[in-house]
Each structure stands twice: as C-alpha cells, then as structure tokens.
Amino acid sequence: MKVLICPDRDAAIERAKGIIIDHVNAKPKAVLGLATGGTMVPLYERLVSAYQAGAVSFAGVTTFNLDEYIGIPPEHPCSYHTYMRDILFQHIDIDQSRTHLPHGMPDDVDAEGERYEAEITAAGGISLQLLGIGKNGHIGFNEPSSSLASRTRVKTLTETTRNANRQYFPEGEETPRFALTMGIGTILDARECLLIATGADKAQAVADMIEGAVSAACPASALQFHRHATIITDQEAASQLRLTDYYQHVHPDGI
Ligand code: PGA
C-alpha cells in the first residue's frame, strides 16, 4: 500500500485530484469507479474547476459508482444518482450515457447485481476505483462481516452507517436500510484503488485498514491484497497509525 499522509484535508483532496487528473489525461478512455459521501464533495468540486480551467476532459471517460440505496428512485433528491448529477456529472463534459450506478428500485435485486457486474466487465473493467471509508471500516456499503470475495449485491446497512447518512435526509424521512453495492471482490478487481480518509473520526478505521489483520471485521483491510492501492489521509485520520515515521519518510507530506 502506498500511504500518503498530507498536512491537512485540503492538501489530501488536492493530492487525490492530481492523481485522478493524471490518470484521465494518461488514459482518456479511463473507466473510473466513483464514490459518494461527504469526503468526495470537495474533490468533485475541484475536478469540476479543473475541467472548467481546461486541465482535464472527461469526454471519453466511463464511470461506475460503488452503490445506491435500495427503495429510492434515481430522481429522489437523496439518491446517489442525484448526488452524482448535481455535484459532478452535469458540470463536466462526460457522456451521460457512460455514467453508471446500480438502480435502487430494480424488479429483481439479484439480477440487478449481476447486470451491473456484466456492465463493468463489458466496459473492460475499472481502471481507477475511488473509495471513501466508513468509521466502521466499510468500503462501498460492504459493512463489517462482508465476504472479502463478494460481488455486487444487496447489503443491510449498519446503524452506524444509517446514523452517518441521516444528515442527508429530510427530518422525519426514514433513512434507507439496504443498499446495492459493489462487492469487495469487485473493488479488488479494479486495476488501481485510491482511498481518501480525512478527519479524526476515521483514524481507527484507517489504522485497522493499513496496519491491522486482513479481516472481514474491517472490510477496507482487504486492500492490503491489492497490488496498486493508494491511501491518502490528512494528519487527523493518520493519528492512530504506528508506522507514521516510515510513511512520512517514504512520501514526505504525502507527495
Ligand atoms: P463520508 O463517507 O465521506 O461521508 O465520511 C465515507 C463512507 O462511508 O464510505
């Protein structure tokens, strides 16, 4: 794992932006795996600014999002379809027909998981998968105890995750209990993974992911098996790591 500890959140987001832009500029037909959540908002804003400044084009890019809530239609204001459209897709030159998310209200959820996997394969596989991490170590919505070999399927969300997501839903509206998510096996198939973690509330999950045992108890720890995984953190999210001096020695200030 390449561990890049940046001085602060801004620097971490800027570092991630640079990696994504370099990837797309080197591979104009890149297949990006995309994530949602609060961490990604400033990153997508910066990608939009970079596009507007002419530093990158997404015209040839294909995207696959990690997950979508079950029981929420794409046009729902709190769906990840809406999140992606509002924050990223409508502001860049991507061909909307090449943006993919699992459908949250499929006729058959098992078939939807298989369909999504087949679409990823047909696109040639994911060249760069962007990831956040939950406080409980989840990646995508692969909650603790998820099979490390799992593929796209339905997962029941933990109460920790539901509580974290409650802020995005109007008061009184029930937060979804289920989601369709790429599996850990799906994520590990990406040719490159880029995980971003900022803030002190991610520190324990980050330590478990990088320095703990590979275990379904911390789904993100499966990235230890990936040959090209980069973890970008700020100082706060890195605060529980034991080998900080080493990571800083290899990549001072996350550079
Ligand atoms: P966050 O979500 O960026 O909103 O913290 C990350 C995640 O749960 O994967």
Image (cartoon, rainbow, N blue to C red):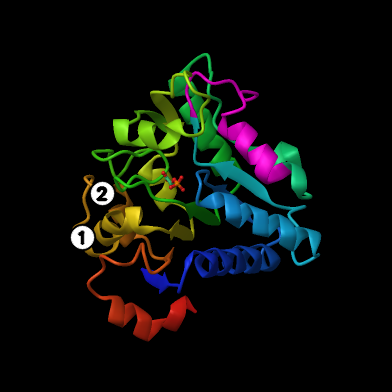
**Residue 181 position in % (x across, y down):** 44, 35
Q: What residue type is labelled 2?
A: Cys
Q: In which quarter of the image is residue 78?
A: top right
Q: What stretch is highlighted in magenta?
A: 69-89
Vertical comparison of 67 with 75: above or below: below
Vertical comparison of 109 with 196: above or below: above
Mark yes or no: residue 193 visible: yes
Quarter holding the N terminus is bottom left
Residue annotated with mark 2? 218
Vertical comparison of 23 with 33: above or below: below
Q: What residue type is labelled 1?
A: Gly
**Residue 144 position in % (x across, y down):** 26, 40
Say whether marks 1 and 2 touch (CB < 8 Å). yes
Q: Which mark is residue 74?
A: none
**Residue 149 position in % (x across, y down):** 31, 43
Q: Does the residue labelled 1 lie within 8 Å of ligand 1?
A: no
Left or right: residue 202 versus residue 24 is: left
Task: Give the structural element (helix, strand or loop) at label 2.
Answer: loop
Residue annotated with mark 1? 212
